[in-house]
Structures are given as C-alpha cells and as structure tokens.
Image: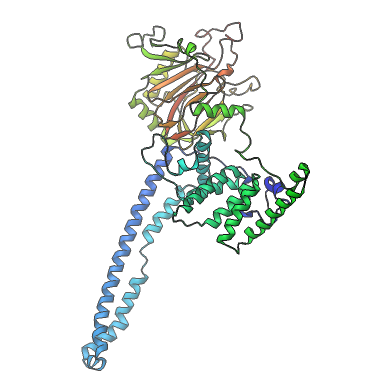
Amino acid sequence: MRSSCTMKAMRMLKVLPLLVLFSSCQAHKDFFTSIGHMTDLLYTEKDLLTSLKEYIKAEELKLEQIKKWAEKFNSISETATKDPEGFLGHPVNAFKLMKRLNTEWLELENLVLKDMSDGFISNLTIQRQYFPSDEDQTGAARALIRLQDTYNLDTETISKGNLPGVHHKSTLTAEDCYELGKIAYTEADYYHTELWMEQALRQLDAGEESSIDKVLVLDYLSYAVYQQGDLEKALMLTKRLLELDPEHQRGNGNLKYFEYIRAKEENTSSSSDSEAVVSKTKKGRPKGHLPERQKYEKLCRGEGIKMTPRRQKKLFCRYYDGNRSPILILSPTKQEDEWDKPHIVRYHDIISDAEIEKVKALARPRLRRATISNPITGVLETAHYRISKSAWLSGYEDPTIARINTRIQELTGLDVTTAEELQVANYGMGGQYEPHFDFARKDEPDAFKELGTGNRIATWLFYMSDVPAGGATVFPEVGAAVYPKKGTAVFWYNLFQSGEGDYSTRHAACPVLVGSKWVSNKWIHERGQEFRRPCKLSELE
C-alpha cells in the first residue's frame, strides 16, 4: 500500500515505485545516543570479538583433531588397498577393521557433529538486548545527513573521512553510502537520496568491491532524480541500468514511461498541461528550512557573525571578584565579555578537571534522553529538536555539586536555592538543540507552574569538554557564536530587570561534527532575586 505522502506523484506511475520502501513517510525518532552509551557498545563489541576468537580457536582445534583422524585412516587405507587379501589375512588387521568401522568412525562422526558455537551463541544472545535497533541505525544516518547539511559537507568528504579534527579516520564503503541513500529515500528525501546514491555509484565505478551492485543503485538513483524533475538525467540513468540488466522489469517500464512523458512534453505547448503530466519536486533540500534555520546553520559554520570592530572594542577581559564576595576577593576569576547585547560573559578556569570528572561520573548512570518543558502543561517531555542525553544532579548528593552551586551564586550574585538542579548533558553523534528560549513567553503562563519559582531569569552553562569540530552555542537573533572550551562557563540573563523576556537570547546548540560535547547548566529562577536584582520600570531594562 502506497503512503499518502507519495500518492500524488505516483498516480500516473504504475511501474516506478519501490513499494517496500515507502512505509517510511511516518516520522521516527532521532538517534539520541551519547558518547558514553556508544562507549559501552564498543566494549560490548570487544567482548563479543573475544568470544568469537575463542569459538574460532575451538573450531580450529576440532579441525586439527579431524585432520589427525583423516591422516591415520588414510595411512591404513593406502596400505590395505594395495593388497587387500594379504592385509586382511592378518587377524589383527581384520579385527582392527571391524573396530574402526564400528567404533572409531562413530567417534569421528560425534566429533564432526560436536557444536563448538554454544558459548559464542549464548554470549551473542545475551548481548543482543543491548544492540542498537533499526530505529537507532536510521537515527544515526539522519544525524550524519544533518551534519552534512549544517556544515555544507559533500558526500565525497564524508565518505573519505576528511573531517576537521579527527584522530581516527574512517571511510564509508559503497554499501554504507547506499544505506544512507536508502534511508533518505524512505523519507521521500530525494535530494539526499540522489547525493548518496551517486556517491555509492562513483565508488562502484572506481572498482570498489561490494555486496551491492550498480543495478540496484541505479534503480534508486533514477527514481530519485525523476522525482526532482530531471527527466533527461532519469532517462540516461535508466538506460545505463538496462545496459547492465536488459531484463530488468521496472527499468524497462520506467524507460517507456519516461519516453512517453518526454514526448508528451515536447508535443504540449501549454506549460500548465506539461505540469499536469507529473508532479515534480523542486531540486534541493527538503522543505521546512526557515530563514532562522539558515541563520542558525551559518553561525554553526562560523559564518554570519555580526560583531563589528567598533562593538568589539567595547568587550573586555577582567579579574572579577563577584562584587567583593568573601570567597572570591582573594582569588578573583577571569571574566571575558563574549557579546554585548545580550550581555554574555565567559568565566575561564571556573571548573577543574577533577570536578568535571566527578560530575560526569555522577551523571553517567542516569543519562537519559534530554527533555524540554512543555509550554502548555509545564511537564518535562522529549522533543525531536533536542538530541542529547541528560541527567539532573542535586547539591545534597555530593559536596562537589554543592560547591559548584555555591560558586555560581557567588559569581552571579543570584540566589540559587530556587534554581533548578544542575543538568548535565552529553551531545554525541550529531547531537544538537535547535533554536529555543530558556524562559517562558507570555503565551506559556504555566510553563514553570509546578516549580513555583517564577520564570527562568538567567542561564549558567559550563563547558566540560573541548569539541574538535562543531558544537558551538549560537544566538541567531543577534548573530553571536560562543565556542566550547573545557573548564569555562558562560552566563547571560534571559529576562530584563522589568521581568520581560529578552528575545535576543534565543539560542541553539550546533550539532557536534567531531568529538563529544559535555555541558552542565543551571537555570536560575526569579524567586529569591527580588533584592539581588531589583525590578525596573522600563520594559526593556
């Protein structure tokens, strides 16, 4: 049964569709796995490999025993068959022949039938419960395509593993490229289908050995190209397919159909009639990429940053003692202005490596897919636009967390007793958080009702890892980009002193291109700040 999302394009096309693939117009979840979880999978695979090697060793030992039996029987047989009567004339030889056929061949049969795989299969069965699912594999493919789009990477670059900052270069096979194209195809994303099927075809044309063949790739590729309106290219690819497999049923049907469409277009003067022949998709990325998305992606690539030299001169670095905080007055911290409006400051060397490791150790067992606050109900729930794993840590759990909370309070001058718990997040493959506000808008009056602490007045964000490529925090409204640096933290106010939301603080976490991104954040709320940050009369102050 064809999915409705393709029915229009398919109504005149009876031979073209690869029907089995179209069940995918339904949305499926993203790949939220953190690097921590992926590390566990690596060790699971290592354990299985050890088990596999033991199985191979057992099979080799078994084979050696069988070879010894064969050599023994062969030696006797060679001698016996040269003079059968003379050989059997010896009573011992006659007895041993009876014994061999009655007993020893039975022992050999039992040895051959002995299953040496029990241990390996048992281990594999146990470990399989931790294996990624089809959905996870699809999510990983989507993450790779997301990175491709965000960072303007061509398929050749990704396939050859030529990514910035990589320490362990890895390449994609033609089959890998084909799988990426097929996953895009199942979502009716013909733009990426074409890109990845063409990459698979290039690698096959270059002589790469593969379990897939050119016919299969050309079948997908020609249809994807056709769906994007390039009839001539679809015809050319279909003809190439039929050169390789003249009996290909769908290929022959497509060729006739494409030639019919071309003839119809040539004979039709009215453009409206021509458009009515077949529904064509404009070539390019799938729809739904709003101007904000384009600004966001540009900032992720380091483009479109709007800081001018004149404004840059007003940004300074300083030693900061938290307005003469007793804790900081003798050891002030290094504070740097990252942006002017909204005012974003970075604190350097504000969390030690030992503290980072402690926070990560406390968070790892609890990492779950990150949630967002439902603007209507205020309940925390998962969202497709936030792809990470997170955990929440309370100050009473460990002295390290309590010490970090105190440090935030001393540096910001804000009361953190009404703040949310420290949230620790790990962004793994393609991990991101699309543009969002931390504070609740006027049309979301109940967003933090359950907490009873008012709106989120400010955000404190620790960077707990360096990221070789990607992973910046960007502010699309103002063209700002802040890059991760281990041991630092950034801070900004989400609300003006009047209590009104500062819409320029809309921000996003760019996808991690290479590496793993660990952050922890503290959302500080309004309650308790009445005298620490008094209200002003002007809405925008």
Vertical order, 421 against 41 (above or below): above
Residue 454 shows up from this direction: no
Residue 295 shows up from this direction: yes
Vertical order, 269 against 92 (above or below): above
- What colour scheme has been applied to the protein in the rendered image? rainbow
Residue at the image position 37 percent from the left and 66 percent from the top? 115
The location of residue 365, given as percent across then percent down, is 42, 36
Residue at the image position 37 percent from the left and 62 percent from the top? 117
Quadrant of res 81: bottom left
The location of residue 313, given as percent across then percent down, is 45, 10
- Give the camera-side residue of 342 and 32: 342
Q: For the C terminus, which image quadrant? A: top right
Residue at the image position 66 percent from the left and 22 percent from the top? 443
Quadrant of res 535: top right
Vertical order, 523 against 106 (above or below): above
The location of residue 234, given as percent across then percent down, is 62, 50
Q: For the N terminus, which image quadrant? A: bottom right
From the viewer's perspective, is 121 left or right of 100? right
The location of residue 301, given as percent across then percent down, is 49, 29
Q: How many marks can you see?
A: 0
- Give the camera-side residue of 142 and 463: 142
